């Protein structure tokens, strides 16, 4: 079928659905929901069999839904209505939730149901639930709805006629309903409120007497203080006391500014607080906030790094590089880099870079420092000689994060993971992280050029077929983690491991003799220097719009295929 994806933005769910539909032979094109007239024009150009709307913030115009079947993906159980479905589910501590695909009609979220897929809730932020449970259920529900549509004999039903449970109309959750009372609220209540607002819109509050929005909260099991007081900092986070404990605040958006790591958003105030360092930085500690951790099982080292949204600042790259150098000294022959739950890595930290310009500094200098810091980390991985390195992608990866993963000997990915191995969307950024060495040797020069040019998201099975990754298994995060441990232990116990390590060192020496890694880096950085310091400001403009969440004014042409000059209806 010809399917138009109508979405507020090309977010992870829209990317995943586009890839899944194309894998099944459907022809897809994307249009951002900018204005009714733009949607009407897209429908006229593409002439879709139906429309799928994975992520909308306003209603589809009647001129469209009255003529075409428009399937809305709603992150709630059948009968649930309103724009804050997941927020309310977290706030009300629902144990079971779901995704419903319903047909657009005049009344918002009240159309007949084409499919509904349940899932179990877990204690997590709205963003994390959306990237995992909601995305998985949405894919299943959309594919089920499409099968029913293609059959031609399915009649969608009103939510009220479906088996229980039924949802209800819930209004937009406003800041009054998210308000925190630090003199009364428990740590669990504070965590739940911030988790229900994570990603967007955050919880409106005050810190150091200044209005701000809070995001990215983590529990603290032992430290205490006067309720409401900020009692310390650790790396990028601030610790704030509640009536029965404390919570770590990871990210803050100050009034009139952008979302930043908390200790950077209030840099001057944070500098006056005591640093609460972890005694054993590497020991995995679930009772407090920790972004880098290391553990060993069955002779295998596991290095995790939980960086918010997968963004890696210069300092985070340097800290992770130090942790990697330390882990390489351990008596293991296999080292697995597991990244974080939601993201493995998305490369350089655009928000921190933008903050440099807001503070009167140079975004170009900050970009240059960040790309060199992540390059140093990639170089350490490429030159790891005494261990087989594995990148285990339990979460999505994008841009430089994809190539940082490819700097490992092996890349294993969870089947539900999405990869975006390209840079051009960020203002024609050329990219570094030794991609010009790492990518062609895996997929060939022509395929490498196509990947960088086409700028399409790849599902893990797609990435496996292209040769970008080495293995793809297990949809569920917990199952994937267990299988990674089993496979890594089996790899560590192989009798020919010493020979494999020797072969790896010899291959690296041959490659170095043909063309040194320093030459690849210099060629990439020559292009990046133009991006950062050259006359074309495209990168700086694109970064500014990305960081400030500027509303889209048009759909990129590599997504809106129906707007290509050469595109014609078959």
Image (tube, helix red, strand yellow):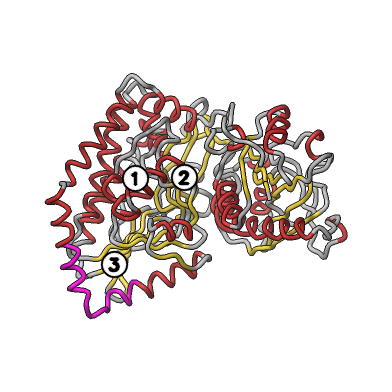
Residue furthest front as drawn: 570
Image disc number at residue 301: 3
Work out whether residue 491 can be spotted. yes
Spatial CA span between label 1 and label 3: 24 Å
Between discs 3 and 2, the one toward the N terminus: 2
Q: Main secondary structure of the magenta part?
A: helix
Residue drawn where x is 30% and y is 46% of the image? 435
Spatial CA span between label 3 and label 2: 29 Å
State the residue position of label 2: 249
Image disc number at residue 100: none
Residue 152 percent across, percent down from the top left: 81, 58
Residue drawn where x is 60% and y is 32% of the image? 563
Dots 3 and 2: beta carbons under 8 Å? no
Q: Which residues are magenta?
A: 488-505
Residue 141 percent across, percent down from the top left: 69, 58
Q: Is residue 281 magenta?
A: no
The answer to whether residue 196 is above or below residue 300 is: above
Residue 63 percent across, percent down from the top left: 81, 33
How crowded pointer 3 is (Cα within 10 Å; few <14, some 14-19, many 20+) is rated as many
The answer to whether residue 217 is above or below residue 364 is: below
How crowded pointer 1 is (Cα within 10 Å; few <14, some 14-19, many 20+) is rated as some
State the residue position of label 1: 235
SS category of the residue bearing label 1: loop
Q: Is residue 557 left or right of residue 31?
A: left
Count of numbered badges drawn on the protein: 3
């Amino acid at each position: 079928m010809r399917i138009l994806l109508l979405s507020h933005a090309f977010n992870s769910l829209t990317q995943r659905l586009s890839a899944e539909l194309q894998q099944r032979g459907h022809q897809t094109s994307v249009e951002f929901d900018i204005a009714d007239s733009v949607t009407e024009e897209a429908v006229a150009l593409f002439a879709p069999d139906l429309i799928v709307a994975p992520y909308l913030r306003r209603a589809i115009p009647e001129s469209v839904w009255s003529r075409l079947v428009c399937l809305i993906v709603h992150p709630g159980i059948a009968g649930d209505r309103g724009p804050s479905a997941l927020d309310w589910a977290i706030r009300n501590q629902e144990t079971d939730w779901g995704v419903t695909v319903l047909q657009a009609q005049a009344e918002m979220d009240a159309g007949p149901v084409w499919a509904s897929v349940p899932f179990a809730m877990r204690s997590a932020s709205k963003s994390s639930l959306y990237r995992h449970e909601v995305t998985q259920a949405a894919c299943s529900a959309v594919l089920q709805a499409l099968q029913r549509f293609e059959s031609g004999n399915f009649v969608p039903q009103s939510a009220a006629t479906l088996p229980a449970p039924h949802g209800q109309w819930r209004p937009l959750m406003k800041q009054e309903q998210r308000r925190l009372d630090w003199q009364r609220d428990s740590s669990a209540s504070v965590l739940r409120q911030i988790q229900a607002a994570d990603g967007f819109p955050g919880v409106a509050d005050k810190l150091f007497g200044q209005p701000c929005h809070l995001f990215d909260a983590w529990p603290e099991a032992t430290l205490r203080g006067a309720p409401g007081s900020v009692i310390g900092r650790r790396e990028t986070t601030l610790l704030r006391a509640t009536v029965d404990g404390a919570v770590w605040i990871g990210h803050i958006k100050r009034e009139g500014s952008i979302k930043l790591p908390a200790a950077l958003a209030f840099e001057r105030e944070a500098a006056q607080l005591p640093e609460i360092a972890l005694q054993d930085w590497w020991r995995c500690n679930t009772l407090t906030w920790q972004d880098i951790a290391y553990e060993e099982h069955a002779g295998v080292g596991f290095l995790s790094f939980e960086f918010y949204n997968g963004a890696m600042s210069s300092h985070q790259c340097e800290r992770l590089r130090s942790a990697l150098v330390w882990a390489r000294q351990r008596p293991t022959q296999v080292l697995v880099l597991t990244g974080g739950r939601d993201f493995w890595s998305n490369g350089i930290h655009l928000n921190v870079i933008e903050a440099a310009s807001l503070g009167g500094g140079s975004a170009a200098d900050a970009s240059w420092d960040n790309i060199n810091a992540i390059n140093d980390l990639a170089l350490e991985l490429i030159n790891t000689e005494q261990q087989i390195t594995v990148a285990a992608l339990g979460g999505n990866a994008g841009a430089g994060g994809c190539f940082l993963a490819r700097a490992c000997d092996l890349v294993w990915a969870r089947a539900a993971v999405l990869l975006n191995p390209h840079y051009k969307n960020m203002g024609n950024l050329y990219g570094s992280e030794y991609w010009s060495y790492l990518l062609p040797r895996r997929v060939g020069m022509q395929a490498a050029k196509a990947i960088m040019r086409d700028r399409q998201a790849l599902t893990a099975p797609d990435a496996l077929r292209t040769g970008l990754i080495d293995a793809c298994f297990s949809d569920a995060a917990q199952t994937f983690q267990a299988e990674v441990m089993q496979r890594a232990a089996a790899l560590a116990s192989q009798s020919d491991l010493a020979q494999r390590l020797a072969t790896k060192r010899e291959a690296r020496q041959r490659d170095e003799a043909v063309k040194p890694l320093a030459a690849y880096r210099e060629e990439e950085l020559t292009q990046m220097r133009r991006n950062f310091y050259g006359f074309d400001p495209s990168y700086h403009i694109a970064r500014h719009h990305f960081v400030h969440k500027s509303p889209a004014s048009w759909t990129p042409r590599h997504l809106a295929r129906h707007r290509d000059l050469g595109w014609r209806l078959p």
